[in-house]
Image (cartoon, rainbow, N blue to C red):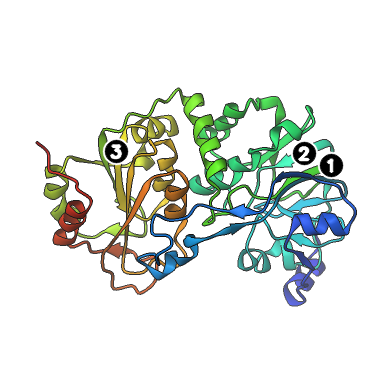
Amino acid sequence: MSLHHRIINRLFPVSPETTDSLSDWASLNGIEGIPLCPERFGATGPWAPDAPPFPELHYLSQPRLPLRLLAGIGGCTIRGRDGFVVLPDGSYLMENTSAKWLLGNPAYFQRFQSKPIPVEGPVFSLLGMHCREHYHWLHDSLTLMHQTLDHLPDNTKFLVPNDLPDDKVSLLGAFKINSEKILVYNPEIPLAPDQLYIATPASPHRYDAPDSLVWLRNKLFSYYEIEPKPKRRLFISREGAATRKIKNMPGLESVLDAYGFEVIHPEKLSLPDQAKIFSQAAIICGSHGAAHTNMIFAHESALIIEIFGGVIGFRTYYASLAIALGMTYKVLMGRSEDPSCNPKEILLNELDLRKCFKENKIRKNE
């Protein structure tokens, strides 16, 4: 791209049209997609019909999930680091992203974009917002294949990020997708597949569909040869993280030890080892973070205790995930000097921790 174009991109951004619903767009444009699942309700909390204990969780009382559709469309472009889908009419599909994430992205607002290169044959994209991260890859990307795989042509290529860790790429083996079917996406080079197969998200984050999550869990159980045996009590450390660390962790270790909790550091473990450890979890406790995604590997009888620093905000992903998986979910509220939902440190009162254990009938080691 020339210097002239780069200057224009900076000074004169554009605002292309956006499309909120794949099914509505397909209907308006005469494209006959494959209905995968009708409009339905997502996971509901154990508090329904009563109000949830925290206002941020109210939406979980009766979440409505849209109709799921699979459509093969020619003339689409995939561009940007997270693989935004540009439909043939030039509009950007919103169902695999958010307005805030899209509108502030150069792949959306730049007037001059790199020319896409053609890709022969059908493509199914596993890209999406934050798709390289642990939660979003397992929860958003892999569940896209629920109910879709049997409808895709045999020669379909599956598009994955170029910098996705090998242990996450290897999970495609759980769906019988070998290396010959994997197409690695370079975010610097937009793609124009002959035919792009697009599926409405199976479990939009924070609005989980139990059938999709249970399907994914069973696939991963089979792949890792896991038979969940809930017996261990896990406390997730965020010692190496930049945010949401338990400030007074040393002072809580004696309490955790008395109640039989093991302090684990998932970031130091391979994905197979994480799967094995969490498959043995009876209780998973820790401050909000990606490691809670590993409840997917746990038994449905597991108790999930998520710690916040005083504010939950939009970070209700794991509440929804736990409920969809049939687990019991509880919030343990700590304190923080930061009023946001992403504090650097959380102070957790020892008495509050003991009270939480007592209320949830967690006994000391005997």
Mark 1: amino acid: Gln
Nearer the N terminus, badge 2 or badge 1? 2
Please say if the residues under marks 3 and 2 sit with CB atoms less than 8 Å apart: no
Nearer the N terminus, badge 1 or badge 3? 1
Instruction: Name the image quarter holding the N terminus.
Output: bottom right
Give the alpha-carbon distance from disc 3 to disc 2, as whole Å: 40 Å
Q: Using the image, determine if residue 332 lies above or below residue 339.
A: above
Q: Does any portion of residue 112 appear in the rendered image?
A: yes
Q: Nearer the viewer, mark 1 or mark 3?
A: 3
Residue 18 horizontal side relative to residue 336, left or right: right
Residue topped by disc 1: 195
The residue at 42%/44% (across/down) is 326
Q: Position of residue 135 (x, y in %)?
A: 49, 47
Nearer the N terminus, badge 3 or badge 2? 2
Q: Using the image, determine if residue 243 lies above or below residue 361.
A: below
Q: Position of residue 213 (x, y in %)?
A: 52, 42
For label 2, the SS is: strand
Mark 3: amino acid: Ala
Q: Quadrant of residue 327?
A: top left
Q: Using the image, determine if residue 295 lies above or below residue 39.
A: above
Residue topped by disc 3: 282
